[in-house]
Every structure is written in C-alpha cells, then in structure tokens.
C-alpha cells in the first residue's frame, strides 16, 4: 500500500517569506498527486494537482508544486506567503488510472505571522 | 449547486449509542467516500463507493457501515459508538471523468463520551 510523508508538522513564517512544504510518497507505479488546504474551521479545498505532463504544476492563490519522479516527491512552494495562508496543508496520492482512493499525509500546519 | 452537504455539523453521543451521519451531493458524481480526521493523523479513508449499490472498505472501516442506494446519498452509520470514534468526519465525492478531483463536505464533528 502507498504511504505519504510530510516532513514538517508545524511551520511558522513571517509574511513575505518563501514557503516550501515537503511531501514524499512511496509507490513505484503511476501516481496522481494532490495538495489540499484546510483553513481554520473549514473543509478541504484543492490547491493543485498533478496527473501527467509538465511536472511543475501551478495552482490557486500563487501556489505551485514540482513532481520529481526520481525522488518520489511533490513539494509545495509559494514565493511570498501572506497571513491569509495560515492553514493546514495536506499532500495526497492516488495510484493508477481510474483510482479514486486518496492516501493523505498527516498534514503540515502553517502559521504566518503578520 | 450545493456541492457536498453533511448533517449534522456537531453531534455528541454516549458510548454504545448508534447514529447515522448524512452525506449528499448534487453533482451526479459516481464516487463517494468517507474520511475521518484526527489530530496529527491526517485524513484516513473509512469506506467508499464507486456507484449506487457498490461499496468497499477503506483503511479504517471497523465500527462503521455504509450503503449507497442512490447516486446522491452516502450515509455513514456508527453501530455502537466508542470514544475512539471521536473525530471529525468528512464526506467527499468525485466524478469518474475528468480530473477526479474530490470535493469535500463541511464535516461533522462527533464526540463520544
């Protein structure tokens, strides 16, 4: 079975700092990769996804992620964070074409200090 | 479109009680699933369904039942609630075509005392 590791449990940044959240997965076959965000008290929303093609994926709110197959990684980045980015971020993977089951990482809580 | 709706938003149960968490979607999605979210554990899949009449177990199915009689509804039943089932429960749905993006409901916060 696949698994997803998120390296940081809690990240604290000042506004305008750059962000990189790590995500690694363990699965040797075809994968679909996702980053979801959960703002305080809200449900999960999709930030971006990778299915195939260009490994650099751009999402909403200025986020991007790069799929590096050789490293089994899908790190999330943002060049300049805002206080409104304070949230919990989840990396998730599904395996194979037509697969709907998502395996989530444990999440990274991001706190942005004004 | 209302998207994915869940009721109730909050629920307190006593150990041994049973209840049903409701989930409905109006996007005609084939795939629906239930997750539980616990601090430091991320989201874990409880049960899922790829269409009406078809359900299967996820990672943590024990103590939960599901059925899928219609495309729109996917209720989750707790048969005999235990304190270990205290959690936030999310329902999600996805289309079988396109990006397979899963749309999540607002969640049900359940406390079992």
Image: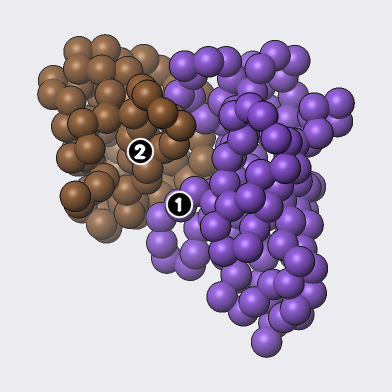
Give whichever of A1, B86 is nearer the camera. Answer: A1
Gap in angstroms between the C-alphas marked 2 and 1: 10 Å
x then y, percent, for residue A26: 74, 24
**Is residue B26 in view?**
yes
**Is residue B63 in view?**
no
* Residue under the image location 45 percent in, 52 percent down: A44
Chain for mark 1? A
Q: What element does badge 1 sit on?
A: loop
Location of residue A24 by image quarter:
top right
Give whichever of B75, A70 is nearer the camera. Answer: A70
x then y, percent, for residue B43: 52, 41
Q: Which mark is residue B46?
A: none
* Residue under the image location 76 percent in, 66 percent down: A79
Please report contact status of discs 2 and 1: CB closer than 8 Å, yes or no.
yes
Q: Which residue is mark 2?
A: B92
Chain A shade in the render: purple
Q: Which mark is residue A44?
A: 1
Chain B shade in the render: brown
| For residue B65, above or below residue A107 | above
């Amino acid at each position: 079975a696949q698994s997803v590791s998120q390296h940081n449990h809690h990240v604290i940044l000042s506004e305008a700092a750059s962000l990189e959240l790590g995500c690694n997965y363990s699965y040797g076959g075809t994968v679909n990769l996702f980053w979801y965000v959960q703002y305080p008290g809200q449900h999960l929303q999709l930030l971006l996804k990778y299915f195939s093609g260009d490994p650099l994926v751009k999402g909403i709110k200025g986020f991007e992620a790069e799929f590096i197959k050789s490293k089994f990684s899908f790190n999330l980045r943002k060049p300049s964070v805002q206080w409104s980015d304070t949230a919990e971020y989840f990396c998730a993977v599904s395996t194979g074409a037509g697969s709907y089951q998502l395996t989530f990482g444990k999440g990274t809580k991001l706190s942005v200090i004004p | 479109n209302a998207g994915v709706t869940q009721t109730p938003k909050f629920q307190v149960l006593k150990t041994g009680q049973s209840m049903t968490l409701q989930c409905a979607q109006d996007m005609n999605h084939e795939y629906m699933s239930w997750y539980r979210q616990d601090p430091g554990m991320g989201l874990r899949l409880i049960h899922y369904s790829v269409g009406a009449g078809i359900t299967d177990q996820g990672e943590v199915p024990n103590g939960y039942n599901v059925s899928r009689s219609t495309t729109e509804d996917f209720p989750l039943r707790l048969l005999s609630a235990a304190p270990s089932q205290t959690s936030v429960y999310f329902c999600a749905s996805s289309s079988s075509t396109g990006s397979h993006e899963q749309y999540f409901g607002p969640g049900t916060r359940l406390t079992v005392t």
